[in-house]
Amino acid sequence: MTALLTRLALLSDGSWSLLAERLGVAEWTFAPGGKTLLLAGLALALVLVAVCYYRTTEGLTLRSRLALGALRFVSLVLLLTLLSGAVCSVDVFRTQRPELLLLVDNSPSMTLPDGSTNRLATVEQTLSQGGLLRRLESQFNVRVQHTGPAPSSAAPQDLARSLIHAAAQPSPQPLAHILLVSDGVQLSGERLARAAAELPASVSSLVVGQTNARDVILENLSVPPFVYAKDRVLISAELRSPGLSGEATLRLASLRAGAEKEIATAKITLAPGGEPLVARLEFPATDFGLQRFIVRVEPVSGELTALNNAAAFHLDVRPEKIRVLFVEGEPSWEYRYARQALLADPAVEFHGLVRLPGDEWFYQGPTNRPDAKPVLRAPRDGFPATPAELNHFDVLILGDLERKVFEQARRFEQVEAFVRQRGGGLATLGGMKVYAAGNYEGTLLAQMLPVEVVREKTMQLINRFNVQPTSQGLVHPVLQLEGDPVKNEQAWAALPWVEGGNAWRALKPGATPLLLHPTLRTPAGPRPVAAAWPYGAGRIYSTALDGTWHWRLARKGDADYHQRFWGLLIRWLANDPRLSQPAAPLMLDDPLLEVGKLAGFSVNLRDPDGNPVTDAAVEFTVEAPAGERLLARAASDPAAPGRYALRYTPSQPGDHTIKAVITGPGDQHREQQLTCTVSPSRAEFRHIVPDTTALAELAAASGGTSLPLAKHAELKLPTAPSSIAVQRVVVNVWQAPGVLLLLLTCLCAEWLLRKRRGLA
């Protein structure tokens, strides 16, 4: 009887699901005096029912009297139950199946094709139509989750972190097992198996995706951080083409106001083995400012997807010119043809000082600066008179100048400060009065150069020879006569001879040898004739030659490698024009901006003398699409004084506006702004083949198994015993909705029956 009343109490409270469970012994409690009221009321209710329907004189059948009496009695009992304040407490014993977390990968890579649909659709079809979910639910209490919000979010996924996060979500009971359905694309840089140590249960995996997929993948782009207007821009594209052969076409287009304009194309031969391939695209830089471009590989027949065939990038085209000062001890062929080459360079502003007979100096170049001040107040003195005048230039070229020229007015110190502190570039050329031949040994200039300046018996090389680039030189920016490495080596091999030069014995440790004499040697090895190295904030190039003009006059082809060499040299020596301005512009550190990829922006602050400003404050603001806003404050970078940087990871594609409010000494305010476009992430689309190894290692490390999704029927998950969960259920019978509803039903039914028989 008690068990029946307990189940009726649960039923009245709406706890339908508990009726089939095993129940403990119920405890009934009542309001003060409620139990007495209920028992006495039951007896009184029987009497009232008997009085009302036993002695009635109306013409009622026995069945009608019993029905009306039962309704009246039940109504009174329910009313008494409400008045008694009855409460039923009972323990419910539930048998629970083990908990299984079914984690479905829905990262962007799961949108890659898989047969007639994509990988994610294949998983959903296998779960429903393939019967996988039904089979799992017959053994486990299955909790289905996805690894991320949606593949349309365009954000790459760290599969290991997603797995750990999903397993850490609150659950009614401990996890017995985890089943991961994924293609195994893991972007964290760590082995997926390491996640096993942070998981509460073993992991099995079902691998989705084609293991023999064929595709063309644009892996990466190599883009210069900036170029000068009208420069020849070289972009290198790295590709892979597993399983595909033949030829592919790359197209480079500019992006403006949503429209594309093709500006360059290139062909590349595909490698079916998946080896890295490099294609190069050249085009002229035209307009100033931050330009945006896109490189696309035309779809190839039979490839898996075109989602990884394109990449967009930014290119900073600078309006500045490189200010070059060439100081030569006497009119020379080297000065003449180097000047012609640099005057023809649209990125160079050439200034020259040449000593004439009679110890007079002849100046060539603009006479005034942009601020109307003279470039050189006394050009006849043969050298900038003050450090401020020298600091106006970006590159200083020193020709055949004897030592006494620099011993006047502390010019050695000026040149050293120009390179070390200001960040200027210095080139020293060969001649009859320089290096050891000019008794430079022991001077401050000799200490700066990458070559050991020591006196030898032989001071000059007098015979003609063809220079030989070193292996380091062939990859150095100064020696890139051609963008293709093979063509570049051929170009250097085909250059005309030079005539003589200074005899160098050795380079200093840390210097980069660029050019060698083809036959002569020293105790240290082949005799060097050109070298370079960094010095302080600047760079130095030294050469024993003064005859590169032969490369122009004696050339046999149409390519003017002489002019190209001097342009490369000047660009390498010149500091980044964005770093040397007192009002430095806001710079984009990485030209490829993508969702989920760390982006960097910076400003470099210097005073008018070129010294870094380290006591400023810079406030960055990032305004992203959909109203997202990021604020940050930056201080000077200790590793790069004067550099104030912001680094953040974009979470959505579209235009991002970055503002930098600079507060300098004396509370001087100025603002820089840059608008750039963030592209959707390409990270996961570079991994077209499922990583079966990573998923198998994860399963092995955690004690699970791994199979292809197509063999899900063979998957054997570890068995776990069912558990008994005890739940204490308290039912306030006196206010249970079922009791109230039944009371109203009985009262209404009795009234209707009495009315039908004319008793109401």
Image (cartoon, rainbow, N blue to C red):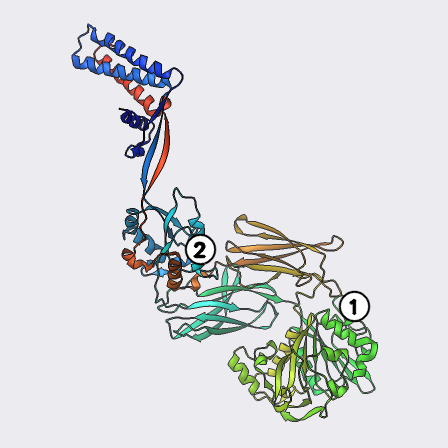
Label 1 packing within 10 angstroms: few (<14), some (14-19), many (20+): few
Q: Relative to residue 434, is residue 417 depicted above or below?
A: above
Hey, which quadrant is residue 183 in on the image?
bottom left
Hey, which quadrant is residue 406 in on the image?
bottom right
- Number of numbered discs visible in the structure rendering: 2
Furthest-bottom residue in view? 463
Please state the horizontal and vertical placement of residue 521, each as a whole percent of the image.
63, 90
Question: Would you say residue 605 is visible in this rendering?
Answer: yes
State the CA–CA distance, disc 1 to disc 2. Answer: 70 Å
Q: Nearer the viewer, mark 1 or mark 2?
A: 2
Residue 117 is marked as none
Q: Name the residue at 46% across, 57% down.
A: 156
Horizontally, residue 590 falls left or right of residue 424, namely left
Question: Would you say residue 297 is visible in this rendering?
Answer: no
Q: Relative to residue 671, is residue 262 depicted above or below?
A: below
Horizontally, residue 95 falls left or right of residue 384, namely left
Q: Relative to residue 198, is residue 521 depicted above or below?
A: below
Please state the horizontal and vertical placement of residue 103, each as a whole percent of the image.
38, 51
Furthest-front residue in view? 25
Horizontally, residue 26 falls left or right of residue 577, namely left
Residue 373 is marked as 1
Of 578 and 146, nearer the camera is: 146
Please state the horizontal and vertical placement of residue 303, each as a whole percent of the image.
37, 67
Please state the horizontal and vertical placement of residue 360, each as a whole percent of the image.
82, 83
Q: Mark 2 — residue? A: 197
Comes first in the chain, label 1 or label 2: 2
Hey, which quadrant is residue 54 in on the image?
top left
Secondary structure type for disc 1: loop
Q: Name the residue at 50% across, 57% down.
A: 596
Secondary structure type for disc 2: helix
